[in-house]
Every structure is written in C-alpha cells, then in structure tokens.
Amino acid sequence: MTGTINLAGTLADGAQQATGVANLAWLLLVLPAAGAAVLLIGGRRTDKWGHLLGSATVIGAFVYGLVLFFDTTALGADDRTRDLHLFDWISVNSLSVDLGLRLDPLSLTFVLLITGVGSLIHIYSIGYMSDDRDRRRFFAYLNLFVSAMLLLVLGNSFVTLYFGWEGVGLASYLLIGWYQGKDFAATAAKKAFLMNRVGDVGLALAIFLMFKHMGSTSYDVVFAEIGNQSTGVVVAIGILLLLGACGKSGQFPLQAWLPDAMAGPTPVSALIHAATMVTAGVYLIARSSPLYSLAQAEDARFVVMIIGAITLLIGCVIGCAYDDFKKVLAYSTVSQIGYMILAVGLGPAGYALGILHLLTHGFFKAGLFLGAGSVMHGMNDEGDIRRLGGLAKKMPITFITWTLGYLALIGFPFLSGYFSKDAIISAAFSAGGGRGWVFGGIALFGAGLTAFYMTRLLILVFLGKPRWEKLKSEDGRAYHPHESGPTMTIPMIILSIGSVAAGAILSGMLPGWLEPSVGELAEVHGPLSHTAVSILTVGISAIGAAIAFAVFGRREQPVTRPQRVSWPVRAARADLYGNHLNEALFARPGVWLTRFLVFVDNRGVDGVVNGIAAGLGGSSGRLRRLQTGFVRSYALSMLGGSILVIAALLMVRFA
Amino acid sequence: MTPTYYLLLSALLFTIGAVGVLVRRNAIVVFMCIELMLNAVNLSLVTFSRINGSLDGQIMAFFVMVVAAAEVVVGLAIIMSIFRTRRTASVDDSNLLKY
C-alpha cells in the first residue's frame, strides 16, 4: 500500500491469499445455491424431501463456517484478512471486476450469524410450513436468500456486494409475496421491491463514483485510495451508501416497506426482516468504515447519526400504537436498526458496538418473531393482539422463550440487550457537546419507549384474561391454542439461550476480534460515565415497563381497538404519516409526470408518426389512380415524358 | 436531293405512327403503327449515315430490323392469345392490370 494513512490503520493493507481450508470458502455460496437450484428445477418430485435438503445445505454451510472461523482464530490478528480469488468476472476496458471472497473477522461474523440463525429458522420452518403444499418452494427461496446474503457479506468488491444485495432483494420479494393470492401480500412485496430500488440506486451511484474517481470497486483499492479524494467525493459516496443502507435496512425515509413486509410467513420475517437482510445496511457502513472514519467524512457520519436517531424514535413511537403482533415487532426492528445505524455513525467509537447490537438483536429478535409465529400457528394465524391474551398457560415454552427475548430486548440487566444497547447509548452521549446530549437523549428515550411497547405486547398476548375464548377466527373456527411441535420449539429455545448469553459473551470479545476489519474500538469519554448511563437506561426502561403495566395490565382491554384516541396515537397508527409523506412527495408527482408523459406520447409523438403515415397513405391512394390499365394512356405519358426530356436536353444545349 | 427531305419524311412517318398508337384501338393497327415508327427511325438513321459518310447508322438500322422482327413474333403471339380468350383485339378492353 502506498502512502495513504487512514484512521482505520491496518485495514487498507492488501489482504492475503487464502490457503488451506479457506480455499473451500466458495462452498458457503454454492451449497445453498445448489439446494435452491435442485428444489426449483426438481419441482414436485422433490416435495417429499425438499425441506430436509434445504435445511441440510444451510446447516452444512454453518458447519463449514464454524471450521473457517476456528481456522481464522488460529491465525495472528494481522493475518486474519484473507482473500479468495474465484474467477475474473467482468473485464471491459478499464473496468475489471473479479469475483472474489473477503474472509475477515467482519464477514465471518456475519457468515456465522446468517448460517446459524438461518439453520435454526430452516428447522423451524419445517414445522411452521408443514401445512403448505408448496413448502419445497419455500425452502428453495430461503436457500436462495442465504446464498445471496452470504455473497453480500463475503464479496471483496462493491460490485460483488451489489450482486448479493440485489439477490437478497429478489429473495425478499419472493418471500414477502409468498401468499400471493392475497392482495395485501402481493402489494407488500411490490412495495418492498420498489422502495428497495430507491435505496439501490443510491448504492449503484456510489459504486459509479468509486469507479470514476478511483478506477476500481474492490475494497482493497477503494479503501486505499479514498483518503486521497476530495471532501466532496467522500461525502457524496458516504451519503449515497447511506441511501442504499436506508433502503435495505428500513431506515427513515424508506422505512415504510418493512412493516408491510410482515405479510410474508413468520420464519421469513424472523430471518430476512429481523435478523439478517435488514441489517445489511449496518454491514455496508461498517464495511465502509475506512471511508466513514476519514476526517473528510465527518458530515456524512453526522447524516448517518441523524438518520439512525430519527428512525429509532419513529420505530418506537409507531410500535406503541400498532395492534398487529408482527408489525409491532417489525417497528421494533426498525428502531433497533436505528440504534445500530446511530452506532456505526459514531465512527471508530461505534462500529464494533453496532455489529455487537446487530448480533444480539439477531438472536433475540429472531426468537421473538419465532415466538410470534408459534403463537399464530396455534391460534389460527391470528395476529391481532387484542384478540389474544392469557396464552402463557397454553403455550409455556413459547411464553418462556419469548419472555427471555423480551427481557433481552428491553435491556434487562446482564441479558444481551443490556450489553449492546447500553454501550450504544453511552457512546451516543460521548459524541461530544450538544450533539452528544441530543443523540444520547433520543437513544435513552427510545429505550424507555421500547420497554413500554414490548411490555404492552407481553401483557396483551401472554398475560391477562384470554379474550379469544368467545371469539372465532376469520375462517369461522374456534381458537384452540396449543404448544407447537419440537421442530419449532427447539430453535426458539436455542435462540432464547442466545438472547440471554450472547451479550455477556460477545461484548468482551467482539471489539478485539473485529479490529482487523473495522479498526480499534475507540475509547470515548462523555459527560456521563458508562455506569451512570447503564443505571439511567435500566431505570428508564423500568419506568416504561411500569407505565405499560399500569395502562394495560390492570384493567381488561377491549377486543376491538378504541377509535376515540388522542392525536399522537392517531398519528402513530398512520405510521406517523410516513406513507402519506412518500405519497405526496414522490408518488403523486410521479403519477402526474407519468400522465403528462403519456399525454405527450399519445398526442405528440404518436401524433407525428401517425400523421406522417396517414399523409403518405392518403397521397399514395390518390397517386394509385394514375394506373388506369389503359395501354394508350401509358403510351401517351411515355410520349409526353420523352418529349419533355428531349426538350430539356435541347434547352440545355442551345439556350 | 438534299438529305433534309428524307429527314422530313422520317419525321412525318414517325408522327403518323405515334398518333396511330395513341388513337387507334385495334391492337393489330397499333402494332403496325409501332412498325411505322421503327422504320421512320431506320430511315433517319440511314440518312444521317449518308450525311456523315460513315456506316454506323446503317448497321444500327440492321439491328433495329432484327429487334423489330423478334418483337413482331412475340407481339403477334400475345395479341393472338388475347384474341383467343377475349374474342377481341381492342387494347382498351385489356385493362385488368391496374390499381
């Protein structure tokens, strides 16, 4: 590496060539991709064993991931970044992109998260989707997703990342629209796809800028050269990457698709829309840490923090007002990713914290979603929490695992969320000056709101009186809640263990482990000590939970949602008018523009073309009449023509 | 005799032929008028040959005669077959090939 020194230290050093067991890293991509191919091409013939194959490929990838992980930990910290060149992918003029894999602590962390949580959710889906006659196709799509997601995190250039990025977008689209016969699912799938495209345009533009200014898109070159670029270029790339992250991670202003994405089956919500795909934005920013760590990128980082803070607040507020089990969890996801984005926006002080929260969140949010799926599985797919209640006794395992996830999420002392979220809040306070107080305050307030809406969920679903006893589900059946089978409960139990223990185990090791990828975790000291922030957070969370108990726990809740509510609740129920805003700002002008263009096209462009054609047709219709069929008239015209020609010749010669 | 008279005769014959082609309906007459025009041209070719003292024009006239003979063969055959199918030799009645 020549001459450029960036804040992330060793990062930009060219990676070493992978050897030994790491040479097989392509297996990670190929195993699930092969599973998807076999299941999709094999069709109905594979119905009997399709789900087993689909799960086996992901478990195989997980096992290989573990092997690779231990292989890497055996190396010294400086040798842990390795590249595996697969083949020359695109080679056009000065653009050359190799398909290569970057095996470093950051990508391996994601590989373990994706294949680990992925394996559990595949196993869970065997039970959850057992009634669906297209279960095989479901597993094919899940495998496709895992393969694309692994490509996203393993690629060693931004183009490879983009390839995986689009692949997970496709898989997400297919799975959100799984119940394609239902209008809301089809619409939700389209909405997710379109809003993701908006973000993808940002990512694509960022890649174009990199190629224009640095002549390459590989991590090695880009991160080595980025320090030599002008502030404008760095900020532009930083903000465009952020736009991409916003689209994929459901961040403001592109957050509206994520709650709608809950139209897909619950395992999909757990895997794609809680644990892995939606965290790709956080990965993108953490991966681009050499860029965001630059002094020139100060403004871009500030924008990242603002987006994170706004989103975490929006998610919490809306989460308080929704009555749909999965949508509350979805908004919770939106707000938790807001925390992660806020953390990575803090720069070197926050990358590792963001990834830490991403991992713990992957455990407990996946567990919470699987618990929600288990409840809905036992309750005729009822997702309206006002029609649930008192399920703790009917579903003890679901209740206990869910409660552990819940405690982890609200940051109960010494569970996962306590370690990861408090660290982020503490780091936010340390951002410096008034900025630190604002971001820290928002994050702290968000923690209180999180405790409030999650406690509300807990009370309305599992505690209180069973409100479903006198009701019937939409298809006219009575509710007979029952505990789910072992393929569903075992993944929930494993994830709940993760929710409890992951934070304590990871918070000590992760920053050091990630150092080769995102740089050293900068020690920052804010106005409040870490202990003080912890006490404050736990206190505020406790207050939030207590308020929820006071409001929802003491008296019976109505089965239908109250209509006469104050304006904040009305606003929150309307997604804080996020959809209205998008519609007014983008959709309507777009429709107007379309109508105008259609008018111009129909009347203007088509008019010219049709006019010329009609003119030619009409005039040739008249000219045609000259062909009378009378030989003598032809002879006359030949004579006339000859005379004219001769006259003209004579004129030229003699006149 | 000045050659001019021959040229005048040739022009007269050509005009008679051309008018005949334009005004007569009977295909045979039209045909004969065409022959008249061809021979008028032959006459002027020979005259010019005489004026210029070279044989080119006369050779050209032979070519015209050969072509005219071939044309008569083909043309009469066409007229015959039209007459057989339509029982008429009027050129105005054979007007199917039109717009």
Image (cartoon, coloured by chain):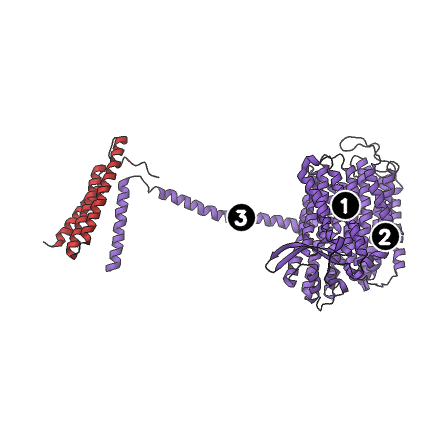
Chain colours: A purple, B red
Q: Which label number is shown at residue A92?
A: none
Q: Which label number is shown at residue A601?
A: 3
Q: Chain of mark 1?
A: A
Residue at 68 percent of width and 42 percent of height:
A37
Neighbour tally class for label 1: few under 14, some 14-19, many 20 plus, Cα within 10 Å = some
Front position among marks 2 and 1: 1
Q: Chain of mark 2?
A: A
Instruction: State the residue in front, A560 or A630.
Output: A630
Compared to residue A433, the image places residue A318 above or below, namely: above
Neighbour tally class for label 3: few under 14, some 14-19, many 20 plus, Cα within 10 Å = few
Mark 1, residue position: A60
Of all residues shown, which one is farthest toward the left?
Answer: B1
Q: Chain of mark 3?
A: A
| Dot 3 or dot 1, earlier in sequence | 1
For this view, does A262 lie left or right of residue A533?
Answer: left
Q: What is the spatial separation of the Cα atoms under label 3 and label 1, in whole angstroms?
A: 55 Å
> Can I make out residue A649 in this image?
yes
Amino acid type, residue under disc 2 in the picture? Gly
x then y, percent, for residue B26 = 22, 36
x then y, percent, for residue A331 = 78, 47
Q: What is the spatial separation of the Cα atoms under label 2 and label 1, in whole angstroms?
A: 26 Å
x then y, percent, for residue A202 = 67, 55
Residue A511 picture quarter = bottom right
For this view, does A38 lie left or right of residue A616?
Answer: right
Mark 2, residue position: A503
